[in-house]
Image: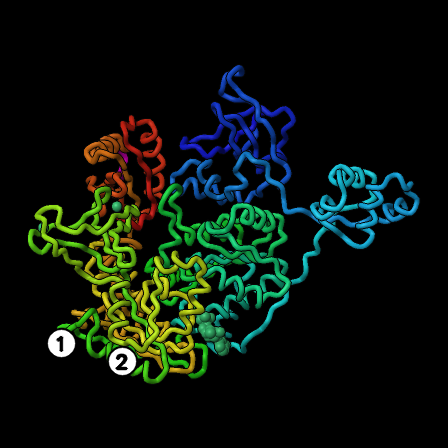
Amino acid sequence: MILRVALDVPLPKLFDYRAEDATRADIGYRVLVPFGTKRLVGLVVELAAGSDIPAKRLRSAEKILREVPPLGRAWLDLVKFCSGYYQRPLGEVVGAALPPRLRSVRPFAEAPRDFALAPAGREVLATLPARQRRMRALLARLSQGPASESELAAQTRGARRLIKRCIEEGWIAPVVPECPVPGFVRAYDLTTEQEEALHKLRRGLERFGVSLLFGVTGSGKTEIYLQLIAEVLARGKQALILVPEIALTPTLEAAFRYRFPGAGIVTQTSASPELERAHGWVLAHRGRAHIVLGTRLAVFASLPDLGLIVVDEEQDISFKQREGVRYSARDLAIARAQIAGVPVVLCSATPSLESFHRASSGKYELISLTRRAIHEAVMPAIRLIDTRVHPVHEGLATPLREAIATRLARGEQSLVFLNRRGYAPTLACPACGWVKGCTRCSAHMVVHSADRSLRCHHCGLAERVPRVCPECGNPDLQAFGRGTQRVELSLRDLFPQAQVLRLDSDAVRARSRIDDLLERAAQADILVGTQILAKGHHFERLTLVGVLNADSGIFSSDYRASERSFAQLQQVAGRAGRASLPGEVLIQTRYPGHPLYQALVRHDYPGFANSVLAERREAGFPPFVFEAVLRAESSDAMRAMRFLREAIEAAPRQRSEISLFDPAPMSLARVAGVERAQTLLQSRSRPRLQAFLSEWSETLYRLPAQGVRWHLDVDPIEF
Ligand code: ADP
Ligand code: ZN
Ligand code: ZN
């Protein structure tokens, strides 16, 4: 028999291997095979009677890895869909989908099992001659209760061999862990709105369907999906929950453990230790875990009894993988739900325009929540501070300073939000106009105050701040603009009596434990931070949010910038006044009349979304067209552009309903010494775009690369 194996190599095909003893039942198993001079772990995808490879060149598979049960049909359909839709070889998708430990050639042993004494063993123990000292010791230990192999090995020499013999003789047996029926802690009585939403969702539990759970921050969306999950578990099914941030998973996991006592809960994120991730993955794959909770990569968890998928904060761009297989976990979640015939619930206070559009046009079920769940909590009042009228000192306009002072006097907490970490975004020489750029990227370097360094936020390059201008020798170099570190210092100066704490990814990195930092954050008087503060955390005393550089989001060349900006502002505004204290949000802007701010003040996401959607329809942008880009990367910009021109030259002639644009450098053209250019494709028809891409992609693999790396990005979010 011939195994057709998916291998994680950049070639769009399966690889044939001989395997004498293989049967169709081996489809879905991992397999160890020789590849060139290396050995690789791949996945058996098909079985064939013959191969096109000449017999003498056909190699044999080393071993079919049958310890872990084979991946099921639905899982294989998911990776095949992903491979087809995102135009990526199946082997690469499988490589991205399996946890690293399961595609390593190092043997994988499942979590050690416990052993227990069988009745036959008890009898033997009574009659075993005294000179069989070690066997007696082992059985005697087990007569007191189950023990793990490592525990037995610590106590008795040669335990492994003895255990093997005992199993063969039927004296001991591995303990099959009991799968307890998970409980559910009902923490609240649902509000009428929540009750109605849950009712609608429950009705759809046995079939495929997409629901958009659209509710203002604090409306209790989480509570609704927790109850829905409880229902799914009660029906003996598994649930998959996708969340955007790694940082949030520990808090969420703790909440899940508390709410679902006895449930098998597995987290899957790129931060999980390799072995732990593999063990969790196998547990879910064996149907022993009830809930899988994770970031985008968790969309590939194997769940044989899948009953529900939830995508929380579905608009978040972290669901889109930006290298390798460039999938959107949200979109794959929908495809997966369809394959499995189960519902998927997308949750958001500010849905992506794609999802909002589909929900408004009836493709998804729209479930809206308009009020906060906690009785007294009202939506925060949002005020715009016109910085042309109220000048800014040290980044803060007078009304914001006064508002912070009032909070301090009342013992309440303030949050100053700006989306820029570091001390200042540019270092420049006022004498000659020199600006410090990164030598490897087309970007400025950012001044960091803690160690007086310059850092590139794109490639990580770090340097010391120079003493003088390298162009003219001027010693008076100036830091322009304002990042979180600079605002932190200003706030300390302004409010010397206050406890000021900065929360951004630098602070998180410096103190590796996020929970530790969050604990300190709860105590602080003033928090300064970036978007990592915007999500999910509840601070009881927080009643004021000030936003500093909001305008940077509204005049970007990226058509998605305003959508993201609105989402982020609403999210950060939602931090204010979550409990019984009313919240206030002050946004500093030079353009208070801008429709985005006007909609924000009215808490009118639908109004904002509909007006942006109208513009997008007019201009021919997603979700009214579908997009893909062909991207080329090279150390030489000319080569990248030449490759793209040749690719367009070689593109299929049949181009009805496809627009293929001229190649252009990306907006950030150079990153870490790599020049990046791309060519955009648009189509009103997704199937036509797909067909075009498949055909084109075959040609692309045959083009001479000449120092260029290329990839297709379907539904891209970077330009
Ligand atoms: P969302 O996910 O919509 O932002 P959450 O589910 O996090 O909202 O709920 C916001 C807050 O309201 C949480 O502190 C939650 O514990 C609380 N909450 C949710 N539902 C209820 C309810 N029915 N009664 C009282 N409090 C609730
Ligand atoms: Zn100079
Ligand atoms: Zn750089």
Q: Residue at x 37, y 76 (%)?
A: 542
At a point 26% along the width and 32% down the height, the residue shown is 647
Q: Position of residue 88 (x, y in %)?
A: 40, 38
Q: Which residue is mark 2?
A: 403
From the image, tell me which residue sits under label 1: 389
Q: Is residue 369 visible?
A: no
Q: Alpha-carbon distance for marks 2 and 1? A: 17 Å
Q: Earlier in the sequence, mark 2 or mark 1?
A: 1
Local secondary structure at mark 2: helix
Image spot of residue 665 (x, y percent) = 20, 42
Q: Which mark is residue 459?
A: none
Given the image, on which type of amino acid does mark 2 rest?
Ala
Residue occupying image coordinates x 59% and y 51% = 284
- In the rendered image, is residue 265 in sight? yes
How many residues crowd mark 2 within 10 Å: few (<14), some (14–19), many (20+)?
some
Which residue type carries mark 1? Val
Please say if the residues under marks 2 and 1 sit with CB atoms less than 8 Å apart: no
